[in-house]
Image (cartoon, rainbow, N blue to C red):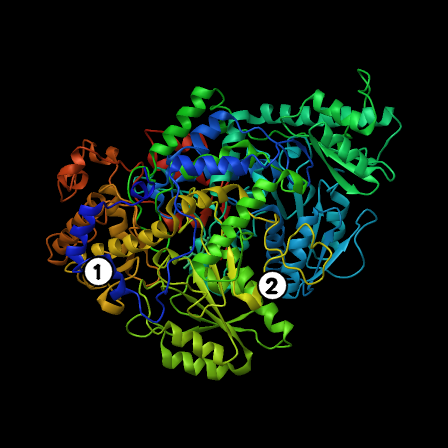
């Protein structure tokens, strides 16, 4: 059985019906009319023939078998851990969790918002700081974000220097070097054992636990930094913090690190959730997404994303960061891990890990081997003059990977799965024997230890049995709408099928249990998979080479823009620092440009939604030889194939600029046109859109960067080998970024092949045009391209009816919840509109269900426009309706309850009940609460006091 019919929604008969509605004889004709001839590809993609699900899994098993699973004691930012089966099965392998979208619509996202809040709460408690966000992409980029955050928020300092602890992880230093160089921050990497180096600095980064395992006391350095007016970031380890004094208590402004060891597999380097926490006062500069607590229309507690006014989709080049997709699913796992083990459980794991490290140290010392640091948590550094390679090899013979620090030193990191036998095998590799019982080592002095309570909220004690955990996770998932319940028609997000066969391999130990720094002879399978995937993506996009290193679209943008910048520099064009970006661009484009030290000039949109060619010419003229390039999205975020795209590219090339094609919309192009052939020099792709990696409630993602021949030398560098190179630019801490989820995209391409990818794109175009045609008489599509057709998405223009009725596009989104739908993309790229992207995976019945809902909503809006009811009292403005509101003994609304709950008859058979009413955003931003609210806030009989209960402990935010 071929996989393609499983992936595509419409079958042959449905396709015919849809073509009829759109007015095309067949798919060939539709595509020929929609896709401009100037860009259409002249040959089919050259990819291997498609495999069935079973065949593809068999082939991939063969590849996986070329990796060698070892006991992983390398450490260096990645600790071996145990993913509790209850979390693996109920979260990581559960479509209710992994197919959900970023919680921008809070009413249908309460479950994942609560899970992310649990993560934030755990991070805040363990770091001893006031606020934490809902994850960053990896530890190294989190440190880079923290540095930029210190620079932004330390208004009193005029310094451009940051001092960084030389004990930081090498991959952190590698990423930081590139990022600081790109924006002109002077980075001073210094040994801080004797204090801070001379000179000014806006910030200092301290490592609480160094790469060699030594635990530092922070207070003196924090004080010195304070005295110089510098802010302090501390990189740290969440498990160690169950024992160690938290950075917040020692005066840190910011703490960062990786939450990987809270139950997330090594995954050959990622995806892992990084965390960032800060003290109050810095919240408006905090990068990434932040979950906060507010109240709903009934006064009950409700969660939602807070302070979105900091983010790139609103602030563009003035945003706090370019991070959009982060690591939500992995943060959810880490938060659930904290809830499952609770404070005593985590402390017990930490003590066991520390005890095993102490056993190792005692055994080494007894054998006369020098243990370099006596204050360690889980990592022991041994001095073995001239013998490091020999010890590493002897350990490998015993099935264990340890870290070669240099020719004379080996470090060993203990993780949760390890036991005394592992430690004794390592000792044998050193030529030492097991220590005698009672031999003491590694006792940490009291001044380093914490004495306070943490994880005291009931969420960290009530889900400790597996039954309780299973039901909590189920109860949370039941509150949410994910792809396992309904289509998610979010424009630009490509919420297509994430097939089970694509997902399965990511849990195989041969992929999941490989350390990113394992020797090459143990990772042949991984490198084969990456090589194949990169070459397939190069073929699909028409570029010369691809790097999968960027772990989100935003990071692919940064990598691509840095490639452009470095290319110009290599030719002596230092002045080429201005990038043109059309006004319709995604907010990350402008935010990424800033991180590459490029100046943004906006190009206007013409009346038909395309790039305004006159304005483009004027801007190119005005910018002159400072033009670095242009960043366009194709097909544009206006949902159309712009016929003049080749002219746009030519105009920029003629002026000496490079063309960046944002490839987030590649789903409309696969097999039909190749950006590398119609004018692009560089693109990023979003594997979590076009290539089936699920969104996971806001991540993980993969944003490969693809480049033409002349930009190949400027692809992201390997963070492991580039640490000392002065012009290297890694964009993630691991060479292959979020490698762990790459098997998903590999499976999709292997199972669909050239024909299937092309069929995906063609069907996606058909589906968008079908929705557009069926709604044309009620909600006209704002922009149509060639052939009066849209690409793979359409912008529904509500503005006329909004003007007549007062009912906004946001009201429509909330009302769609009552109909059981996730809203389309709201107000992007045009205010007052909804952007619909059905994807190829929805069948005709589901598309019609959506169309019926939208038409019914149109009728409801019309009733308001005609004065039958005011906007304020309408079923739209009061949406969504909870069961509690609808079953209350009192009912004073001008519409019947049945209209609120069952506006279409089918809803009586299958109904999604919103767990909360409309969520108040402004109130939640004024009193920012980013931890789990006290139980009293949920008192059933007193919703009115919820607000008060929540506000205890709120961070009052100043504008
Ligand atoms: C999604 C998207 C991005 C950003 O990608 P992330 O993976 O979320 O960082 C950039 N541009 C466009 C057009 C997008 O749709």
Residue 382 visible in the current orientation: yes
Q: Position of residue 924 (x, y in %)?
A: 41, 47
Q: What residue is shown with label 1? A: 802
> Toward the viewer: 414 or 591?
414
Q: Where is residue 863 in the image (x, y as percent from the top left)?
A: 12, 53
Mark found first going from the N terminus, 1 or 2: 2
Q: Disc 1 to disc 2, how far (Cα)?
A: 48 Å
Residue 494 visible in the current orientation: no
Judge whether 297 appears above or below 449 on screen: below
Q: What residue is shown with label 2? A: 714
Judge whether 603 appears above or below 470 on screen: below
Q: What element carries label 2?
A: helix
> Toward the viewer: 166 or 406?
406
Q: Taking the image as four quarters, which one is ligand 1 found in?
A: bottom left
Q: Residues within 10 Å of mark 1 (few under 14, many from 20)?
A: some
Q: How crowded is mark 2: few (under 14 residues within 10 Å), some or many (20 or more)?
A: many
As drawn, is 200 to the left or to the right of 452?
right
Q: Where is residue 403 in the image (x, y as percent from the top left)?
A: 73, 38
Judge whether 37 appears above or below 51 on screen: below
> Toward the viewer: 212 or 517?
517
Q: Pointers 1 and 2 in contact (CB under 8 A)?
A: no
As drawn, is 540 to the left or to the right of 855?
right
As drawn, is 394 to the left or to the right of 301?
right
């Amino acid at each position: 059985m071929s996989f393609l019919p499983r992936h595509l929604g419409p079958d042959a008969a449905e396709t015919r019906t849809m073509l009829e509605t759109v007015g095309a004889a067949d798919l060939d004709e539709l595509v020929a009319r929609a896709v401009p001839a100037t860009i259409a590809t002249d040959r089919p993609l050259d990819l291997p023939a498609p495999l069935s699900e079973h065949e593809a899994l068999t082939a991939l098993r063969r590849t996986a078998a070329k990796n060698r699973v070892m006991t992983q004691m390398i450490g260096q930012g990645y600790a071996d851990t145990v993913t509790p089966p209850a979390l693996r099965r109920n979260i990581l392998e559960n479509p209710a969790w992994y197919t959900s979208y970023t919680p921008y619509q809070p009413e249908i996202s309460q479950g994942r918002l609560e899970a992310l809040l649990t993560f934030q709460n755990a991070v805040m408690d363990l770091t001893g700081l006031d606020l934490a966000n809902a994850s960053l992409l990896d530890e190294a980029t989190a440190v880079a974000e923290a540095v930029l955050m210190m620079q932004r928020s330390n208004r009193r300092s005029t310094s451009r220097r940051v001092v960084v602890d030389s004990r930081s992880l090498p991959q952190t230093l590698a990423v930081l070097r590139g990022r600081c160089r790109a924006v002109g921050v002077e980075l001073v990497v210094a040994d801080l054992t004797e204090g801070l180096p001379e000179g000014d600095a806006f910030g200092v980064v301290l490592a609480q636990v160094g790469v060699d395992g030594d635990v530092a006391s922070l207070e003196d350095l924090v004080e010195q930094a304070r005295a110089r007016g510098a802010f302090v970031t501390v990189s740290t380890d969440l498990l160690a913090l169950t024992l160690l004094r938290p950075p917040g208590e020692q005066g840190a402004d910011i703490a960062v690190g990786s939450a990987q060891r809270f139950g997330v597999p090594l995954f050959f380097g990622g995806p892992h959730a990084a965390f960032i926490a800060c003290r109050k006062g810095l919240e408006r500069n905090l990068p990434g997404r932040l979950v906060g607590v507010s109240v709903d229309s009934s006064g009950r507690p409700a969660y939602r994303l807070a302070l979105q006014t900091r983010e790139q989709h609103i602030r563009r080049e003035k945003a706090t960061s370019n991070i959009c997709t982060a690591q939500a699913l992995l943060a959810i796992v880490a938060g659930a891990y904290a809830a499952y083990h609770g404070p005593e459980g985590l402390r017990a794991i930490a003590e066991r890990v520390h005890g095993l490290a102490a056993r190792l140290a005692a055994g080494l010392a007894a054998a006369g081997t020098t243990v370099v640091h006596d204050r360690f948590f889980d990592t022991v550094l041994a001095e073995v003059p001239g013998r490091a390679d020999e010890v590493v090899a002897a350990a490998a013979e015993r099935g264990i990977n340890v870290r070669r620090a240099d020719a004379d030193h080996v470090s060993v990191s203990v993780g949760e799965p390890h036991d005394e036998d592992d430690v004794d095998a390592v000792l044998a590799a050193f030529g030492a024997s097991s220590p005698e019982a009672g031999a003491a080592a590694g006792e940490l002095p009291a001044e380093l230890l914490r004495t306070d309570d943490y994880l005291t909220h009931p969420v960290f004690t009530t889900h400790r049995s597996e039954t309780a955990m299973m039901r909590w996770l189920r109860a949370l998932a039941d509150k949410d709408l994910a792809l396992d319940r309904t289509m998610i028609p979010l424009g630009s997000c490509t919420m297509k099928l994430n097939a089970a066969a694509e997902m399965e391999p990511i849990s195989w130990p041969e992929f999941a249990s490989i350390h990113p720094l394992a020797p090459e002879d143990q990772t042949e399978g991984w490198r084969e998979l990456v090589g194949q995937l990169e070459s397939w993506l190069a073929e699909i996009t028409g570029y010369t080479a691809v790097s999968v290193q960027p772990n989100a679209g935003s990071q692919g943008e940064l990598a691509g823009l840095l490639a452009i910048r470095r290319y110009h520099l290599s030719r002596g064009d230092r002045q080429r620092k201005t990038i043109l970006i059309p006004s319709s661009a995604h907010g990350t484009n402008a935010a990424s440009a800033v991180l590459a030290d490029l100046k943004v000039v906006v190009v206007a949109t013409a009346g038909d939604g395309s790039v305004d060619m006159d304005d483009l010419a004027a801007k190119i003229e005005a910018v002159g030889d400072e033009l670095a390039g242009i960043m366009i999205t194709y097909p544009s975020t206006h949902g159309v194939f712009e016929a003049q795209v080749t002219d746009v590219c030519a105009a920029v090339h003629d002026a000496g600029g490079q063309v960046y094609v944002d490839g987030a919309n590649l789903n409309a192009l696969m097999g039909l046109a190749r950006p590398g052939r119609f004018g692009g020099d560089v693109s990023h792709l979003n594997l979590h859109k076009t290539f089936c990696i699920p969104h996971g409630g806001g991540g993980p993602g993969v944003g490969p960067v693809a480049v033409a021949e002349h930009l190949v030398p400027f692809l992201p560098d390997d963070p492991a080998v580039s640490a000392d190179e002065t012009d290297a630019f890694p964009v993630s801490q691991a060479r292959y970024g979020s490698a762990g989820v790459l098997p998903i995209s590999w499976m999709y391409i292997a199972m669909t092949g050239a024909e299937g990818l092309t069929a995906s794109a063609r069907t996606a175009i058909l589906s968008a045009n079908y929705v557009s045609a069926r709604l044309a008489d009620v909600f006209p599509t704002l922009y149509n391209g060639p052939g009066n057709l849209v690409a793979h998405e359409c912008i529904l223009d509500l503005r006329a009816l909004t003007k007549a009725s007062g009912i906004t596009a946001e009201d429509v989104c909330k009302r769609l919840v009552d109909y059981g739908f996730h809203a389309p993309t709201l107000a992007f790229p045009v205010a007052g509109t909804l952007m619909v992207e059905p994807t190829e995976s929805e069948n005709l019945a589901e598309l019609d269900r959506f169309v019926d809902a939208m038409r019914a909503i149109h009728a409801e809006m019309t009733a308001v426009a005609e004065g039958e009811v005011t906007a304020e009292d309408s079923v739209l403005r009061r949406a969504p309706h909870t069961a509690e509101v609808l079953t209350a003994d009192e009912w004073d609304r001008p519409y019947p309850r049945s209209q609120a709950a069952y506006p279409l008859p089918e809803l009586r058979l299958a109904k999604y009940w919103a767990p909360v009413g409309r969520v108040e955003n402004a109130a939640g931003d004024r009193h920012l609460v980013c931890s789990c609210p006290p139980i009293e806030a949920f008192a059933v009989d007193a919703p009115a006091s919820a607000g008060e209960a929540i506000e205890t402990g709120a961070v009052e935010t100043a504008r």
